[in-house]
Amino acid sequence: MPIPQSILIVKRSNLMKKFLLITSCVFLLCLSGCWGMKEVQHQIYITALGLDFKKGQYYVYFQALSFSNVARQEGGSSSSEEPPVLVGTGKGDTLEEAFDYIQRSSPSPLYFGHISTLYFTPSMLKHHLNEFLDYAGRTEVIRYNTGVFSIKKDIKEAMSLNGFFGKSPAFSFTFNPGEVLENDSFIPTITYQNLIQRYRQPVGSMLIPSIKVEESQWQEGEKPKSIVKISGGYLLAHKKITGWLNINELEGINWLDKDTTRLYLVYNEKKIGVKVKRPRVKIKVMGAELTPHYRISVKVPVTIQENLKEISQTEIKHIVAAQVQKQIKRTFQKGLDLHTDVLNLSEKAYRFDRYHWTIQELNELTSDSIDSIKVKVTLVNTSAYK
């Protein structure tokens, strides 16, 4: 008796389903999925690197944080105990050897994808920065948005400090300077990307902010609280470090920095204090001379914060303009003493009129290179109660 056509169709359908199921399973076995993925607790996450050169060897300091503590703090949970900060030290005749030195002693694999900060000592900056840039460029250890700082001493102590209220270093200035500088742009900061972009530039300079450990300004309970504080900065020009200036000597840079959002000026003799929001600068290159000359114009919108002697608004404008001019001139002269274009004036001529002068002529700055500094002060708010 012949099999009905409907039964044959059902059997063929079932066979097709089984075939597709078996085929799918075979293809699934070929997929890698997440089998090789490591869980968070099975790796040590490096969050900052410190680099030094002493006694003929490279020293690399690895800072690692517990991400469980960071997550708990971001979630609003409080703890009386400070989160642990792990600092390891590797050394070697080469940078690769120094990195391997610490990795071999680690009980878990090291992961470098979360590095947020780089610390360089003066010896590393002055004599071995090129070696590090070559190594980092080949190994892709450093992300381009990593912050760059210098430190004269106490590099391990600086990397071991927790933030305020028992928070981890992830909430400190060197990990996230933008939040602090948004309120007071007292010094420009740079990233690893800025460093590699400007390292080989034939004109101008770059400022690498320097930090120090300070314990005289804050107190936590009965004990002084150690913090990381900006002390000044090293100037990098033409692939070498030309010198160091303190924080007061660098004040003039802020008026020419496009990222400056807010500054404060105080004139003690008249008991005047003002807040400046988003100053704007224009630099005009004069091309009639053998070397370029510059005319600087700065627009300074101010809000009066303090005026105990009730000085007139006109006089306040004159005082502020004179202070701005003084800071720009002082910083420029300090740069000349170090044979460095600290204000990056020559970069303006190099970018927009580079064929009018040679590189040597662009770098020949003197005290007469600035023709004028014009400061226009506008009063935005007196902050006076009616």
Image (spheres, grey):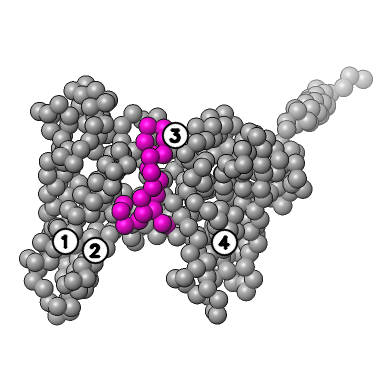
Mark before the other along the chain sequence, 4 or 1: 4
What residue is pinned by disc 4? 161
Mark before the other along the chain sequence, 3 or 4: 4
Foreground: 78 or 215?
215
Q: How far apart are labels 2 and 4 at the CA level?
A: 31 Å
Q: Position of residue 85 (x, y in %)?
A: 63, 59
Kind of element beneath mark 2? strand
Is most of the magenta stretch helix, strand or loop? strand
Q: How far apart are labels 1 and 2 at the CA level?
A: 8 Å
- Whether residue 213 is in magenta: the answer is no
- Whether residue 238 is in magenta: the answer is yes
Q: What crowding class fits label 4: few (fewer than 14 Cα within 10 Å), some (14-19), or many (20 or more)? A: many
What residue is pinned by disc 2? 265
Tell whether label 4 touches label 3 (CB within 8 Å). Answer: no
Residue at (49%, 51%) from the top-left corner?
151
Q: What crowding class fits label 2: few (fewer than 14 Cα within 10 Å), some (14-19), or many (20 or more)? A: some
Q: Judge from the rendering whether residue 104 lies leftward or rightward of residue 61; answer left or right.
A: right
Amino acid type shown at disc 4: Leu
Tell whether label 2 touches label 1 (CB within 8 Å). Answer: yes
Mark before the other along the chain sequence, 1 or 3: 3
Q: Which residues are magenta?
A: 230-250
Q: How far apart are labels 3 and 4 at the CA level?
A: 28 Å
Tell whether label 3 touches label 1 (CB within 8 Å). Answer: no
Kind of element beneath mark 4? loop
What residue is pinned by disc 1? 320
Mark before the other along the chain sequence, 2 or 4: 4
Residue at (8%, 71%) from the top-left corner?
312
Q: Position of residue 364 (x, y in %)?
A: 24, 32
